[in-house]
Image: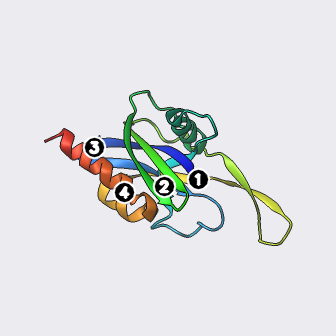
Amino acid sequence: MKRSAGILLYKKEREQYFVLLAHFGGPYWEGCDQGAWSVQKGIVEEGENVLAAAKREVAEETNLQIGNDIHFLAAKKVAKKKLAIMFYTYYDGDISSFKSNTFQLEWPKNSKKFVDFPEMDKVQWFSLDDAKDYIHPTQRFFIERLEGKLRDSHS
């Protein structure tokens, strides 16, 4: 089974929690909004430490440097042969340095022209409620799990 790992970044402003989500890049997601956002995550390479993979993915997809106070959030099967392992950490840094790695795609389809697209084309802070509407449906579970952990830690 393939494994992916990521880190859900959150912050608190005026008694409200927010999570940082990234919008999928490329022509298939252009013009899509609800369901087209994701936690920064990606495939764990053979022999790679899961947390190291999660940190690498955040760096590749956002260019953001996060600290080391990272906690396990949950693991969930998100596809028939894919397990997502998610961590979380508080992050209240500047997101203006956002820059994503790229991927190549034949575009337009069957044109034999290959174009580079950003893996993620933008990042944005969402309230927890809004994040549940905008995140890809297979990842909504992680927002709900973080919401529960934050609620439990302040009760």
Residue at image point 48% right, 55% down: 38
Do callouts 1 and 2 mark residues in contact (Cβ within 8 Å)? yes
- How far apart are the two marked residues, 4 and 1, measured between alpha carbons? 21 Å
Quadrant of the snapshot with the C terminus: top left
Where is mark 1, residue-wise? 120
- How far apart are the two marked residues, 3 and 2, measured between alpha carbons? 21 Å
Residue at image point 57% right, 52% down: 1
Q: Which mark is residue 141?
A: 4
Q: Residues within 10 Å of mark 1 (few under 14, many from 20)?
A: many
Of the residues under marks 1 and 2, which one precedes in the sequence? 2
Of the residues under marks 3 and 1, which one precedes in the sequence? 3
Where is mark 3, residue-wise? 13
- How far apart are the two marked residues, 4 and 2, measured between alpha carbons? 12 Å
* Quarter-of-image position of residue 91: top left
Q: Amino acid at mark 1?
A: Met
Residue at image point 49% right, 34% down: 51
- How far apart are the two marked residues, 3 and 1, measured between alpha carbons? 25 Å
Where is mark 2, residue-wise? 38
Residue 85, percent across and down?
Answer: 46, 45
- How far apart are the two marked residues, 1 and 2, measured between alpha carbons? 9 Å
Of the residues under marks 3 and 2, which one precedes in the sequence? 3
Q: Is residue 28 above or below residue 8?
A: below
75 displayed left or right of 80 = left
Q: Amino acid at mark 4?
A: Phe
